[in-house]
Every structure is written in C-alpha cells, then in structure tokens.
Image (cartoon, grey):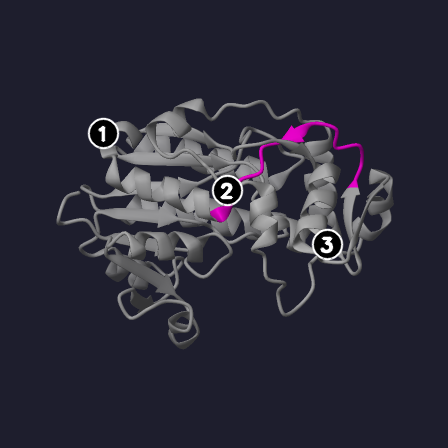
Amino acid sequence: MNANVKVLVIGATGMAGRVVVTQLDQAAVPVRALVRDVPKARRLFPASVELRQGDAFDEATLQKALEGVSHVYFHPAATLSRSEARSMDRVGTRLLVKHLPATAHLIKLSEIGAGPNPSFHDIDCKYRSELDIRERLTSWTILRPTWFMESIPFLLTMGPVSVCFGGQPGPIWWLSCQDYALTVLACVQKPAVSQNRVFTLQGPEAYPMLDALRLFNREARTGKGSLRLPLGLLTLPARWSEQFRFNQQIMHYYNGRRETFESEPAHRLLHQPALTLAAFARRFHPPARGGTL
C-alpha cells in the first residue's frame, strides 16, 4: 500500500463508521476522524486515530480536515426526516465534491437498490448523491450495502419483542458491519479494482426478515419474542412521529422489494464476507438502552 495513504472518515462515531475506523487502524492505515465531540470520540478510539474537531457541513473545518488525505470515507448519519436526509446526504456530498483534493479518492456509503424514489427519501437522496459523485469527481467508489445485522436489535426491536411489519417475504443477505468495514479497507488497499465502480454489498447467507429476527433472538439469548404485524398499523402513528414515518417508509419499500444476490464482483475483487447471522448474534452484547422502533 502507498506510504502516503491517509483516510479521513466522516461519520466515524456511528454504528458502522466506528467499525470502519477500527478496521483501518488495525490494518495500520493512518486514520483521521472528523468529529463534533473529541472527548467522546476519544473514548471510542485509540490514540493512533487522529481526531479533528469540526463539522462536515462547516466548509472551513471540512477544508482543514481534508488537508493531506488520500482517501475520504463518507458515511452520512441516518436520519428520519426528509429535510434532514437532504442535508446530511445531498449537502454533505456536494460540499465534499466541491472541496475534495484533486488527488483524493472518495468512498461513499449508499444503499442497496438506490434509485429515483420520491416516496422513500432515504433511497432517493442516496441515488442523487451518487449522481453528483459520478458526474463531478474523477476518483470514487460507491458502496451499496444491504441491511446491517446490527440494525436488528436497534431498528427492529420494540420493548420485549422484535417486530416485522408487513409480509417482508423476500430474503435479505444480512451483512455485518465488520465485513462491511473490511470491504472499505479493501477499497483503500486495492485502488486498481475499486476505482470508479459501484459495488452492491451483501452477506454470506439470506433470511427473510422474520426468520432473521427469530434466529437472532434465539442465538443472542435476548429472551425477546418475534412477531409479524400488518404494515397498516404504522399508518396512524406515522402521521405524528418522524420515527414511525421512517419505519413505515422502509418497511413499505422492502415489503415490495425482492433482493437478489448482486455481490459477486465485490466478493471476488474486494472482500468475501464470512460472519454469519448466527455467529454475530452469539457475540452480541445488549446495548445499555433499548431499540428505536
């Protein structure tokens, strides 16, 4: 690997971002993380990770953070509202496109199936950000992961039960943040095969959502039940809650989507995911607070 490599991570303290930072650091890749709260971030990362205080939406601090880096990994924060999604993803991408050094390479988190979809702001914003990158940058990689395994105990848990809304009949190739982070590392280490490509990222095995919830709860010994509820039950709470509105959108989207396996190029060229959902569940440590559904 080139001795001049240094990766700026934006979104370093999020669910997947912190795993990306850890994997890069463990591989002896110099990492700089742009964070709002340095003391809080320092508790997450070793001293070998450089921390820069700032905000990706503040052009002055962003420009300083970009100085001397060869790669930027951009992981926009997950958000519930349409306006925030535009700000986090679209505006953040445009600022990076504007200020990215000419020699730097951008690695951007997107989402499986990203495309024009005005009824689901998350997918739509990610797709439009992809267009900005592909049209205006000369060196980039776009990663489109499927559902992260880590989302099961957070997004899909409500009190004593894990909930699947709607039929959700199609299988999902659940991906761990660990395998995702190793793919990001491979993008840094293998520029010849990752440059200017869009990769769909999926895990080693597929389960429909309800089966995945049951498997996770059994292997993690959470003591939680798993059940399926009609998608229509989200209609009323979605009128007054951003959280339920987002859940309604994502459940409606995946209720009508049939995920097919599209990750052969990523597995062959970058990284072959190995962590199964059962193995992930067995090593899972419950968070201090409950899920978000």
**Tag 3 or tag 2, which sits nearer the N-term?**
3
Q: Which residue is mark 2?
A: 275
Q: Amino acid at mark 2?
A: Leu
Report the span colored magenta: 165-177
Crowd rating for badge 1 (residues with CA inside 10 Å; few <14, some 14–19, many 20+) = few
**Which mark lies nearer to you, 2 or 3?**
2
**Position of residue 224 in the picture relative to residue 96 (left or right):** right
Please report the residue visible at 37 percent of the width from the left and 57 percent of the height from the top. 22
Q: Which residue is mark 3?
A: 157
Q: CA distance from mark 2 to mark 3?
A: 22 Å
**Tag 1 or tag 3, which sits nearer the N-term?**
3
Q: Amino acid at mark 3?
A: Thr
Q: CA distance from mark 3 to mark 1?
A: 41 Å
Is residue 287 among what the camera can see? yes
Q: Which residue is mark 1?
A: 192
Q: CA distance from mark 1 to mark 2?
A: 26 Å
Q: Amino acid at mark 1?
A: Ala
Q: Nearer the viewer, residue 249 or 170?
A: 170
Q: Nearer the viewer, residue 216 or 197?
A: 216
In which quarter of the view is residue 33 placed?
Answer: bottom left
Image quadrant where one finds the N terminus: top left
Q: Position of residue 197 (x, y in %)?
A: 35, 28
**Position of residue 232 in the picture relative to residue 224 (left or right):** right
- Local secondary structure at mark 3: strand
Label of residue 114 in the image: none
Residue 207, compared with residue 63, is above or below; it is above
Image quadrant where one finds the C terminus: bottom right
**Which mark lies nearer to you, 1 or 2?**
2
